[in-house]
Image (tube, grey):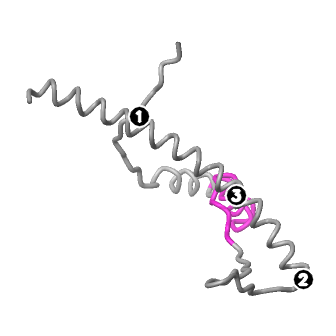
Amino acid sequence: MTDKAHLVENVKNWLQIDTEIKKLQQEIRKRRALKKDMTDTLVQIMKSQDIEIMNAGESQLIRTERKTKSALSKKHLINSLLNFFKEDKETVAQLTTFIMNTRPEKTIENIRRKVVKK
């Protein structure tokens, strides 16, 4: 097989797989939305009935609660630094610039498909 024929075959296969993945992802999105709705309903029922663990055949449904911190934003960083350094705006500006500029950058190479609409 020549290089050109091999390239054409690879492109065709790549496009077919990409199309299949998009269809499967749509199905997954639908199912995730359904699961989220059911989860919200179950959590409310379990919470109102004060149920922590529910037996469901060979498995169990366990209601859990966890707290997470939100992402660190530039606005929050500046406000926190201003609060910590007692309104010393020059130091806060220098620290913010330093922190924002020294964040590591990551380069990722990929191929993306753009569907040409007719």
Is 12 rendered above or below residue 22?
above
Q: Which SS class for mark 3?
A: helix
Crowdedness near tag 1: few (<14), some (14–19) or many (≥20) residues, C-alpha within 10 Å? few
Q: Which residue is the site of mark 3?
A: 76
**10 to the left or right of 103:** left
- Residue 59 in the image: x percent, y percent? 63, 83
> Mark 1 or mark 3, which is nearer the start of the sequence?
3
- Quadrant assignment, res 46: bottom right
- Residue 81 in the image: x percent, y percent? 67, 62
Q: Residue furthest top?
A: 118
Q: Amino acid at mark 1?
A: Arg
Q: Amino acid at mark 3?
A: His
> Mark 3 or mark 2, which is nearer the start of the sequence?
2
Which tag is nearer the camera, tag 2 or tag 3? 2
Q: Amino acid at mark 2?
A: Gln
> Mark 2 or mark 1, which is nearer the start of the sequence?
2
Q: Which residues are magenta?
A: 68-90
- Quadrant assignment, res 64: bottom right
Which tag is nearer the camera, tag 3 or tag 1? 1
Q: Which residue is the site of mark 2?
A: 49
Q: Which SS class for mark 2?
A: loop
The one nearer the camera, 80 or 86, is 80
Residue at x-position 74% and y-position 65%: 83
**Residue 51 part of the magenta-drawn span:** no
Q: Which residue is the site of mark 1?
A: 112
Residue at x-position 70% and y-position 63%: 80
